[in-house]
Amino acid sequence: MKINKIILSFISAVAILLSTSIVSFAKVVGDKIVLGAAISLTGKYSSNGVHTQNGYNMAVDRINSMGGVKVGGKTYKFEIIYYDDESNPKRAAQLAERLISQDGPKGPSAVNLKTA
């Protein structure tokens, strides 16, 4: 039963990441899955961005408090890094490029969750 809750929480977190951010990524670093998102934390759309950040944090806190996720027999915790796109489309595009090219997944075991 506990594993079902963890799986449901993980799927929910991934769905949130994919549906609300301009771009997101995930990569494995040691025993952590590092998630990244470019969201509006300042500017015209900051209210939405703050709610998005709160939702991400709530999902990650819950998953981590339940022991994380188990993939291939190994347990991982989540961590998130955020970039503020300042509610500016040009800045959002720059950050999307950064998440994909600089911060994004590297190596064959990385999971790429980027969206356009």
Image: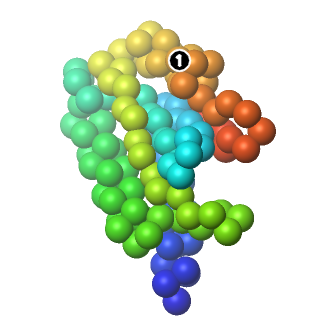
In this view of the protein, can residue 12 be seen by the observer? no
Identify the amino acid type marked 1: Arg
Q: Residue at x 56, y 46 (%)?
A: 30
Q: Residue at x 67, y 69 (%)?
A: 73
Q: Quadrant of residue 67?
A: bottom left
Figure quadrant of the C terminus = top right
Q: Residue at x 27, y 49 (%)?
A: 54
Task: Point out the residue furthest to the right here.
Answer: 108
Q: Quadrant of residue 39?
A: top left
Task: Point out the residue furthest to the front here.
Answer: 30
Q: Is residue 70 above or below residue 81?
A: below
In percent of width and height, residue 94 lies at 49, 12
Identify the element where label 1 is drawn.
helix
Q: Is residue 94 left or right of residue 54?
A: right
Give the labeled residue for mark 1. 98
Q: Is residue 93 above or below residue 99?
A: above
Q: How is the image coloured?
A: rainbow
Q: Is residue 105 above or below residue 20?
A: above
Q: Is residue 41 left or right of residue 31?
A: left
Q: Is residue 53 left or right of residue 6?
A: left
In this view of the protein, can residue 105 be seen by the observer? yes
Label 1: few (<14), some (14–19) or many (≥20) C-alpha neighbours in 10 Å: some
Numbered-mark total: 1
In percent of width and height, residue 74 lies at 63, 64
In percent of width and height, residue 112 lies at 66, 39
Q: Is residue 86 left or right of residue 8?
A: left
Q: Residue at x 40, y 62 (%)?
A: 64
